[in-house]
Amino acid sequence: RMNSRGMVAMMLSNLAIAPTLAKVSDALGRKSLLLVSPTWCFALRLVELIWPRAHVLLATTSLSALANATPQGVMTAVAELFPGDAQGAGAALAQLQLGTLFGAIVGPMLGASLANR
């Protein structure tokens, strides 16, 4: 229940952050957008490492909407690589999605096997 509150807060804040990030990437370039997300993610994980408490995990989950900048930036950059070629952009995004799905399948399986040891 506690985790769901953090996820709801993150998704609601993402509604405001996503359009703002689009404008920032237009003004400052795609590279800045692609660097914000891993930097923010690292900072949040560092806070969790230093203070591993339930309320800290709730707060970092709630604040993680900024980490959604990477997929948005990558998709925008891929679309810009294929101007006028929707099929080429679609194929590149499909390959990108394949990597994401592979991680979503293998990650939990690997985590479960490590937790059993």
Image (cartoon, rainbow, N blue to C red):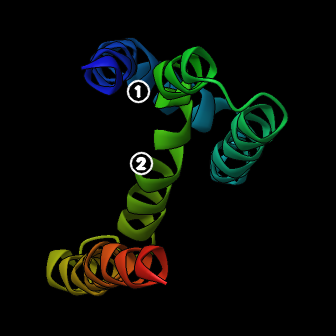
Q: In the drawing, does residue 22 fall left or right of residue 36?
A: left
Question: Residue flagged by tag 2: what amino acid is it?
Answer: Gln
Marks 2/1: CA distance? 8 Å
Where's residue 114, x and y in %? Answer: 48, 81
The vertical placement of 67 against 93, above or below, is above
Ranked by sequence position, the earlier of labels 2 and 1 is: 1
Judging by the rendered image, the residue that carries numbered circle 1 is 18
Q: Residue at 39% across / 85% down in the picture?
A: 113
Quarter of image, res 44 = top right
Query: Could you tell me residue 71's position as x and y percent?
Result: 43, 54
In what quadrant of the picture does the N terminus appear? top left
**Residue beneath the point at 21% across and 81% down:** 94
Q: What residue type is labelled 1?
A: Ala
Q: Is residue 22 above or below residue 42?
A: above
Q: Which mark is residue 55?
A: none
| Residue 54 placement: quadrant | top right
Q: Which residue position holds label 2?
A: 72
How packed mark 1 is, by other alpha carbons closer than 10 Å (few <14, some 14-19, many 20 or more), is some
Q: Where is residue 48 in the image (x, y as percent from the top left)?
A: 71, 35
CB under 8 Å between callouts 2 and 1? yes
- Foreground of the two, 15 or 64: 64
User: What crowding class fits label 2: few (fewer than 14 Cα within 10 Å), some (14-19), or many (20 or more)?
Assistant: some
Q: In this view, does 18 lie above or below 81?
A: above
Q: Which residue is drawn at 34% across and 70% down?
A: 83
Q: What element carries label 1?
A: helix
Where is residue 39? Give x, y as percent.
77, 45
